[in-house]
Image (cartoon, helix red, strand yellow):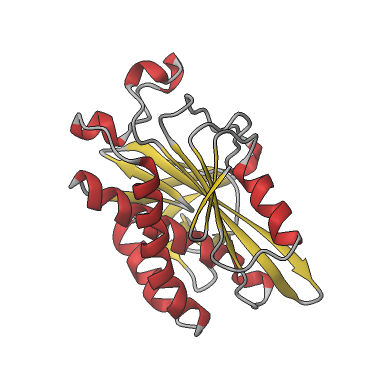
Amino acid sequence: MSKKSNLVILRQAGSTQDEAYKIALDGAPEGVAVITTNQTYGRGRTGRSWISPPGKNLALSLILRPQCYPEKAPLYGLMASVAAASAVEHFTGRVAHLKWPNDVLIEGKKIAGVLSQARIRGSLIEFLIIGLGLNINCTESDFPNELRKTRTSMFELTSRTFDIIEVGETFISDLKELYIGCCLGEFRHVLDLWSEKWIHKGFVVERDGIRGIAEGIDDSGALEVRRNDGSLVKISSGEINFSE
């Protein structure tokens, strides 16, 4: 293990989320991030595994202590996906888009995903762990066959290799700029930035008997879906399939 300012850099970790959660419980301050390029048991939203070859991609988990109510937690996930998109654009020069709630896409392929995990104490969030999995230097052959048409990496987009720690630091810097406003209750700016990058507005949504048109997100970050009968349904979590 090595430390660089507020970075805890691990040669290998089962899950940076678990490592960050442990040190947050022990009192690690806000802004400390756990990073590894060799995550052996990474996970995404809904418990899915994050597949990443050793030494090629970024797994990062950042501790935040926003002192807010639990219903605000999803907004910090949206904030992190905006920051991740900004970092990818900075290094690749490509336009990034977002899939609700927290996936980053380039040319329709997933390049990054965000996972937020909150610990509640009393009526407030004690701390929040923002996890980022970002494909940086992996190649198409590193992905399982079934994922090659739907995943990409910064290397695949540019034919260049990148300093993984530098990319992580850029993400953290971009996130901190947004976080300052969120801590002041100024979530509208994040919601607007997220909406500008959202690629599925007007797409058809189908899930659990719900079918309609994706219209946007509300002030809590929930997906708003307009049914054929004109009623508005809000979806607050889960995997969504979008089709044109």
The x and y percentages for residue 65 are 62, 71
The x and y percentages for residue 196 are 29, 63
Q: Nearer the viewer, residue 107 or 143?
A: 143
Residue placed at 45% from the left, 82% from the top?
A: 186
Q: Is residue 64 left or right of residue 140?
A: right
Q: Nearer the viewer, residue 138 or 85?
A: 138
What is the quadrant of the C terminus in the image? top left
Seen in the picture, residue 199 relative to 32 is either above or below; the reply is above
Where is residue 71, by image quadrant?
bottom right
* Residue 202 seen by the camera: no
Q: Is residue 34 left or right of residue 172?
A: right
* Residue 2 seen by the camera: yes
The x and y percentages for residue 11 are 55, 35
The x and y percentages for residue 30 are 59, 68
Where is residue 147, by image quadrant?
top left
Q: Residue furthest bottom?
A: 184
Residue placed at 21% from the left, 32% from the top?
A: 160
Residue placed at 38% from the left, 59% from the top?
A: 83
What is the quadrant of the N terminus in the image? top right
